[in-house]
Every structure is written in structure tokens, then in C-alpha cells.
Amino acid sequence: MKKLIWILAILVLSGMISSALAEKTDTGNPRVFGRINATYMDETDGNDWHSYAKEVSFGVKGVYRLTDIDGLTIPYKLEMEVTNAVNNTKGTNEIEIKYATLALKTKYYGKFVIEPRGESGLQRQIYGPVDIFEIYEAHLKGGLFAQPDEASGVMAYVSPKILGFNFIPAKLNLGEGSDDNNADPDAWCARLVYSNKLGPGNLFAGIGYVAVTEEATGKDEEYTRKSAGLKYTWGAGHQIGTSLEDADDHPSGKEWETYGIAGRLKLPANIDMGLGYYFQEGDKENYAIIGNLRYHLNKQAYCYGEYGQFDKVLPSADILGTYVALGITINFISNPL
């Protein structure tokens, strides 16, 4: 609890300091934001229905606009996730730093990112077309895809958008355990993404590549992942998307491919419906069918019901062969100070 109090105090202090600096250099003040996703879930292997937090997070974010340098801005974001602390019945605080990121965004030359900790941009963009559900998430913790949802020690560059395309190379250091492995970087990745209007909606397409060095894996070969994603959105909340991933020379000695397709349809009366199918083949085989309904209370809050059916148990995700979940999600963000 003391750790949580200190973190809250730091957040408040950082907001005060940011506000003071903003008077001289910034036209946009910091905002406090967060998300609470609480669910009542039944894993139908005989476990009882139980309530728990799927995600509880909070933080501050903002953008400094430097008046002395035309077109240069500094976006920043600091976010804590306290989901484990909420779910820990013994009262032990387990607080995760979800985001700690700074960027230099220029008017003509792209964006330079320093991210000691943050969400994987490759996962967000390339796997985002099928990562649309409340309980099941289409990344490593979900059990079918191999791409992690978060990254550490990231330095990245985002090119200017040219004819709808952005190129994003990045290097990663994979934590203290690999600091002395004589590899710099421990891993590198790159993605090429395209986004533009098409007909009544918007089209997104992207390809990605990740290579983890031999020194970081402790094996004789690099571990590589190739991925691609495609999404089309239109109207007031309709979307359809697909993602695929090819994992080669995994440290476990296995190789596999995973495919996913998912869509969301906006219905009358503030309701939308999502449906997804995921299929894994190779040295690892599995499939999943996920569906949900959401009722939107307003733009920031909604209730949901979700059902998931898997061919095999996914112990890494705490999701068993079948689950049913009922919950509510609230997102919040403060007005500028």
C-alpha cells in the first residue's frame, strides 16, 4: 500500500510540475487517464463463477509544444497497471509499469521514440485487427500468437507518412537478464504500415518482422517472427480484420503459424457485436472461437458479455477450454488542467 501511495504522490507532483512548465513551453496540459475492466467469469471446467479485474490502470499523458522550435513536440506517457494488486487476495501489491515513454515529434522528419517500457507498437498495429475482445487478447498471453503485448528498452523511429505509408524500425533490449550477453540490440524489429481512406471507410495494412539474437535466446539460431495485418473500418463502429503470424526457430525448438479473423458490427440501441476465429498449426496446434456483445452506456463506458471456446487449454492465459464472462469497462480521462 505504501508503494501505491508513493506512486500516486509522484503522479500528482509530475502533473503540477508539468503544469508549471506548460506556462512557458506548452499549449496542452497533462491529463490523468485510466481504465477499469471488471468481470464476473465462469471457466466451465468446474470452477466457480468469480469476479476479478481484467484490467485496472491509470496514468498521466500529454504533449509539450516548444514555442521556440517550430513544429517540434514532445509527447509523453506514464501509466501504471495495478490489475495484479487488485486480484491478489492476500493484499500484496504487485504494480506494473505499463508505459514510460517519451518521443520527439518533428514537423517534417518523423518521430523519434525512447520507451523504457511500453505497449508493443507492432502488436498494436499488426495484431490489432483481431485484438478486439475484452477477455481474450490476441498476443503472447492469449496463448495462440507469439508476439508479446509489451516491450522494454525500445528505441524507435517513425518515418513521415508518404503516400499513405510509414516505416518504423526499432531496437530492443530485453531486460536485466540479457544486459551482459554481448548483443546490442537483443532484438530488432521493423514494420511497414499503410493507412488511407477507401470508399466509405478507412483501410489499414501492415507487415512486420522481429528477430531475437542468438545471444538473447541462448540458442544457435535467431528466433524470428513474420506478421501481417489488414483492417477495414466504416460507419459508426463497423470493422473487419485479419492477422497472421509465422514463428520460426522458437527457443523451445518449435515452429508454428497462427491466423486470425475478427469483426465488429454496430447494431441499433447502442449495441455492437464482435466475432473472431483463430487457428494455429505447425508444431503447436489450437483454435479459438470468441464472441461478445457490448452495450454502450456512453462514449466511455459499456457492459459486455463474452464467450470463448478453445480446442486446448491455455494455461499461460489463465483461460481454459471454455469461458463465459459478464463485465463492465470504464475508460476515463480528465479535462486539461
Image (tube, rainbow, N blue to C red):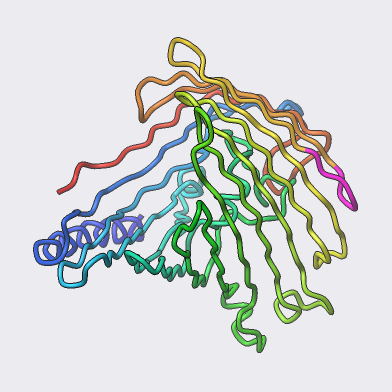
Instruction: Tell me, yes or no, if residue 324 can be seen here.
Output: no
The quadrant of the picture occupied by the N terminus is bottom left
| Residue at image location 49% in from the left, 16% down from the top | 271
> Residue 3 sits in which quadrant?
bottom left
| Residue at figure coordinates x 68%, y 29% from the top left | 290
Q: Position of residue 20 (x, y in %)?
A: 11, 63
Closer-to-camera residue (202/23): 202
| Magenta highlight range | 279-285
On whether residue 280 falls in the magenta region, the answer is yes
Q: Quadrant of residue 325?
A: top right
Pick the front one: 121 or 330: 121
Q: Residue furthest top?
A: 269
Q: Which residue appears at 61% of the width and 65% of the height? A: 190
Closer to us: 272 or 304: 272
Q: Residue at x 24, y 42 (%)?
A: 334
Q: Is residue 126 left or right of residue 44?
A: left
Q: Could you say where residue 115 lies in the image, as x and y percent from the top left? A: 45, 68
Q: Is residue 123 left or right of residue 276?
A: left
Residue 152 vertical position relative to residue 290 in the rendered view, above or below: below
